């Protein structure tokens, strides 16, 4: 299907939708006060949180056809880097520190990814579901006191939906460029004491995509991406719930076009990978509100499986298998008084890691205890917080073992002199233990390359502080935060002289500092209009990212900038978003050679129009999308050009 034909189709459908009146106005949405659970492991109001936090609502997630979590997060100043949509690998960065694009994602990442407050099976955000999500919370800065290893740069907490008193559902199907087909469905509600929420999402890309130069990127399609989420629970004795969450993401036959740094963009190859994650989470929640008590107990079991088949260029496929399994438990008790709140508990995490290039295995066992305190003074005018955590870690790799115990501290303050202004400051410590990938190493025989591991690697340590403000006044929301992070013993893969090999080593102290901010202004709220018109801006600017020799740290962008315009008119059932993302410059190093990417801006446009409203029986909407409007040629990782201009049209039914 040609791009021009699709463009005319999208334009025609959108124009017809705009002219089509809604037969009746749907019921108004129920407003509820925003709460945050990531910062303190309990529900709290954003103005009482002493760390920088962003909440992405379910409405924002549902109204746009985001391919994966990385596409969503980059619109909030989170850096994105990846291989291609066809390989289903995407990394993210917070404050200059990012997740990797290979290996045991969940444990090697300086950004901790959570599902409903417990460790996810992966930090590869392309393997996170985009269906049945209630909201996403982004906590910036060290958070080892709350969650232990990996939370150096921040935390991404994906919170799944729970069924409410009324039944709601949605179904959507659509078609787009490069023979892309998408479908999803979701349902939530309750029957007596049982609440149920879940959804399924599937997509397929049959053709290779074109880049911004209109080159066809060979072997960039994929067979299928399938995700499902189910969250069900039984409520009893008013304040108690026993629930189970099941989650799975399966990406089958993701064609790997290979790095054009080594191969021409048009060269055929047969490389592909299969990726699969599964998560099972059993959670009991209870409390006694009259005494200010709340408690939780949970057990979870997750797995991350990666099978990669690489074309060696001589007619054969080499196989690489990578498996990681986490199981763990959490127990916590919270007490909230008039002035003082306390949350304490215990965490247990066991990780087992294997991969096919070595017979050795790596295991880590982590037992931890934590205590978080918050002092509320002058009717929430002044909030003081503090916490301490002790982690007992045992690392086993091959026939060797080590103890890697760690103690972390944090302190913070929030000052609310007026209802519309919040000032924040926070200091926190963090760490990350060496993982199976780094202690065992691995081999890439098709590239005649070996990554040598080292069990004697030191744990990474981080110490960070930040200070900033946030304003919320008559539709205006704005905030600015200055941050600094000192990073000791950073684990990197360093080239071995006169070979193609790499060795995992610790680097001495490095320092990151910068600014992050956001601003939006709802003109509709300010002028009391019947519609929303909201320009917005989110950014991260890295002022310094240097090692102890004063050299710039590679793979750190100087700017991550997202801005645009949101429009919605409920009376006419119309939603439209125009989004721009600027990716700053980043230097990447390969075998001692430096490559630069970035300095590019991409633009996307989304529109949704209700064309039929069946009152109590739901409403039917049409959706249109143009990604990379100006057909910009760009790479988020050197040698891997991203898709050029693309189109999508779909129908959605909400009831």
Image: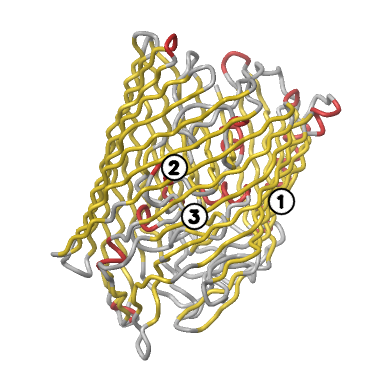
In the rendered image, residue 290, in percent from the top left (x then y), is placed at 44, 9
Which of the two labelled residues, at mark 1 and mark 3, occupies the earlier sequence position?
1
Which of the two labelled residues, at mark 2 and mark 1, occupies the earlier sequence position?
1
- Single out the residue that lies furthest toward the left: 399
In the rendered image, residue 560, in percent from the top left (x then y), is placed at 64, 58
Label 2, on which residue? 129
Question: Residue 527 sits in which quadrant?
Answer: top right
Q: CA distance from mark 2 to mark 3?
A: 32 Å
Report crowding for label 3: few under 14, some 14 to 19, many 20 or more residues within 10 A (C-alpha).
Answer: many
Cβ atoms at labels 1 and 3 below 8 Å apart: no
Which circle, 2 or 1, is nearer the viewer?
Answer: 2
Q: Is residue 127 above or below residue 503?
A: above
User: Can you say which quadrant of the picture contains the C terminus?
Assistant: top right
Q: Is residue 205 above or below residue 554?
A: above
Which circle, 2 or 3, is nearer the viewer?
Answer: 3
Q: Is residue 340 above or below residue 158?
A: above
In the rendered image, residue 66, in percent from the top left (x then y), is placed at 56, 46
Label 1, on which residue? 8
Label 3, on which residue? 463
Q: Element under label 3?
A: strand
User: Between 525 and 612, which is closer to the camera in this rendering?
Assistant: 525
In the rendered image, residue 40, in percent from the top left (x then y), is placed at 47, 34
């Amino acid at each position: 299907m040609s791009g021009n034909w699709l463009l005319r189709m999208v334009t025609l459908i959108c124009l017809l939708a705009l002219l089509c009146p809604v037969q009746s106005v749907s019921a108004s949405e129920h407003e509820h006060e925003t709460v945050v659970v990531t910062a303190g492991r309990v529900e709290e109001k954003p103005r009482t949180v002493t760390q920088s936090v962003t909440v992405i609502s379910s409405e924002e997630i549902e109204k746009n056809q985001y391919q994966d979590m990385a596409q969503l997060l980059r619109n909030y100043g989170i850096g994105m880097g990846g291989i291609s949509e066809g390989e289903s690998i995407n990394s993210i960065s917070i404050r200059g520190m990012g997740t990797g694009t290979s290996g045991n994602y969940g444990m090697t990442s300086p950004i901790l990814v959570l599902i409903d407050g417990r460790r996810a099976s992966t930090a590869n955000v392309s393997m996170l579901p985009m269906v049945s999500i209630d909201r996403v919370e982004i906590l910036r800065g060290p958070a080892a006191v709350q969650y232990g290893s990996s939370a150096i740069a921040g935390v991404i907490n994906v919170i799944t939906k729970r069924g409410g008193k009324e039944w709601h559902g949605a179904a959507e199907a659509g078609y787009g460029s490069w023979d892309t087909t998408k479908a999803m469905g979701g349902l939530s509600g309750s029957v007596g004491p049982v609440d149920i929420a879940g959804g399924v999402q599937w997509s397929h890309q049959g053709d290779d995509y074109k880049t911004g130069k209109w080159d066809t990127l060979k072997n960039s399609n994929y067979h299928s991406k399938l995700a499902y989420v189910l969250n069900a629970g039984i409520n009893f004795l008013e304040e108690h719930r026993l629930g189970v969450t099941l989650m799975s993401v399966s990406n089958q036959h993701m064609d790997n076009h290979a790095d054009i740094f080594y191969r021409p963009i048009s060269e055929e190859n047969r490389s592909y990978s299969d990726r699969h994650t599964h998560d099972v989470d059993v959670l009991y929640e209870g409390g006694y509100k009259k005494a200010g008590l709340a408690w939780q107990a949970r057990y979870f079991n997750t797995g991350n499986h990666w099978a990669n088949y690489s074309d060696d260029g001589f007619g054969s496929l080499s196989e690489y298998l990578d498996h990681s399994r986490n199981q763990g438990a959490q127990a916590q008790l919270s007490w909230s008084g008039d002035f003082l709140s306390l949350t304490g508990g215990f965490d247990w995490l066991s990780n087992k890691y294997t991969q096919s290039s070595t017979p050795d295995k790596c295991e880590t066992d982590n037992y931890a205890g934590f205590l978080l305190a918050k002092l509320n003074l002058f009717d929430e005018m002044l909030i003081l917080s503090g916490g301490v955590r002790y982690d007992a870690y045992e690392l086993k790799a091959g026939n060797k073992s080590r103890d890697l115990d760690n103690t972390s501290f944090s302190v913070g303050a929030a000052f609310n002199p007026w209802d519309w202004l919040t000032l924040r400051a926070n200091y926190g410590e963090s760490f990350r233990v060496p993982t199976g990938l780094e202690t065992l190493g691995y081999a890439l025989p098709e590239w005649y390359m070996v990554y040598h591991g080292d069990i004697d690697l030191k744990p990474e340590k981080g110490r960070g502080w930040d200070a900033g403000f946030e304003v919320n006044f008559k539709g205006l929301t704005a905030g600015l935060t200055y941050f600094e992070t000192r990073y000791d013993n950073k684990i990197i893969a360093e080239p071995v002289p006169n070979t193609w090999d790499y060795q995992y080593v610790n680097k001495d102290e490095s320092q990151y500092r910068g600014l992050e901010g956001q601003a939006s202004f709802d003109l509709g709220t300010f002028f009391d209009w019947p519609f929303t018109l909201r320009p917005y801006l989110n950014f991260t600017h890295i002022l310094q990212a240097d090692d102890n020799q004063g050299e710039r740290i590679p793979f750190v962008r100087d700017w991550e900038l997202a801005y645009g315009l949101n429009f919605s008119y409920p009376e006419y059932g119309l939603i439209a978003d125009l989004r721009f993302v600027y990716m700053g410059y980043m230097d990447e190093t390969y075998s001692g050679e430096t490559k630069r990417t970035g300095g590019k801006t991409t633009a996307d446009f989304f529109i949704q129009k209700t064309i039929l409203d069946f009152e109590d029986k739901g409403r039917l909407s049409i959706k249109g999308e143009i990604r990379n409007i100006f057909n910009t040629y760009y790479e988020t990782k050197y040698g891997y050009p991203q898709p050029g201009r693309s189109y999508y049209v779909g129908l959605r039914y909400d009831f």
